[in-house]
Amino acid sequence: MAKKLVTEALWKGIASLLPEPEPSPNGGRPRIPNRDCLEGIMSVLKSGMPRQTLTTRLGHGSGSTCWRRFHLWTQLGIWPHLHQRLLLVLGRHGQIHLERVVIDSASVRALRGGRTPSRTPRIAVEMAANATL
C-alpha cells in the first residue's frame, strides 16, 4: 500500500474546512469521502500524472470524481483557508523546512529592485493581405 499523503494529524487539522458531500437524491453509490478525494488530488499534483489515469483501485475515486471535488472546493474558496491551516499544522509539528522555500519573484515586490521598465511601444496598424475576397 502506498504511503498516505494526508496523515491523521493533518486530516484532523483540515477536515472541518471541507464540506461533507451530500448523498445524491437519486440514490446510487455513496459519495467518496473528502479525505480520499484529497489523497487523489494530492497524488495527481505530486506525481504529475494526468488525472484521467487516477483509478478507483487506488481508493481515491476516479479522476473525474477528484476533479469535481477539486472544482467545488475551488468555487467555494476553500484552498486559501486550507493552505493557511496546513501551514499551522505543519508548523506545530516542526515540518516546515525554510531552507526549501521558493519565492516567485513575479508575486513579490523587489523593494530595492532593478530599474523601472520603459513603456511598451505602440504597434502601428497594418493592413494584411486577405485572400478570401
Image: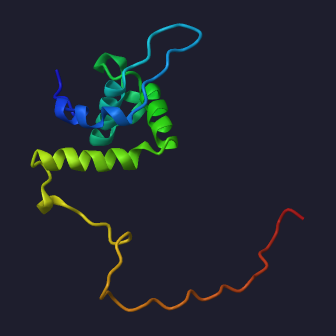
Quadrant assignment for the N terminus: top left
* Location of residue 106 (image quadrant): bottom left
Q: Position of residue 86 (x, y in %)?
A: 26, 45
- Residue 50 lies, with reference to residue 95, above or below; the image says above
Q: In percent of the image, x 55 and y 89: which residue is there? A: 119
Residue 45 as seen in the image, left or right of residue 29: left
Q: In percent of the image, x 45 and y 38: which residue is there? A: 73
Q: Which residue in the rendered view is the most extreme toward the front?
A: 16
Q: Count how many numbered circles sit on residues in the image.
A: 0
Q: Position of residue 57 (x, y in %)?
A: 31, 16
Q: Which residue in the rendered view is the most extreme toward the left?
A: 94
- Residue 84 lies, with reference to residue 125, above or below; the image says above
* Location of residue 9 (image quadrant): top left
Q: In percent of the image, x 32 and y 48: which residue is there? A: 83
Residue 7 as seen in the image, left or right of residue 59: left
Quadrant assignment for the C terminus: bottom right
Q: Which residue in the rendered view is the most extreme toward the right?
A: 133
Query: 132 or 30, which is in the foreground?
Result: 30
Q: Position of residue 54 (x, y in %)?
A: 36, 27
Q: Position of residue 129 (x, y in %)?
A: 79, 73
Name the colouring of the figure.
Answer: rainbow
- Residue 29 lies, with reference to residue 114, above or below; the image says above
Query: 89 or 38, which is in the foreground?
Result: 89
Q: In percent of the image, x 46 and y 9: which residue is there? A: 29
Residue 90 as seen in the image, left or right of residue 27: left
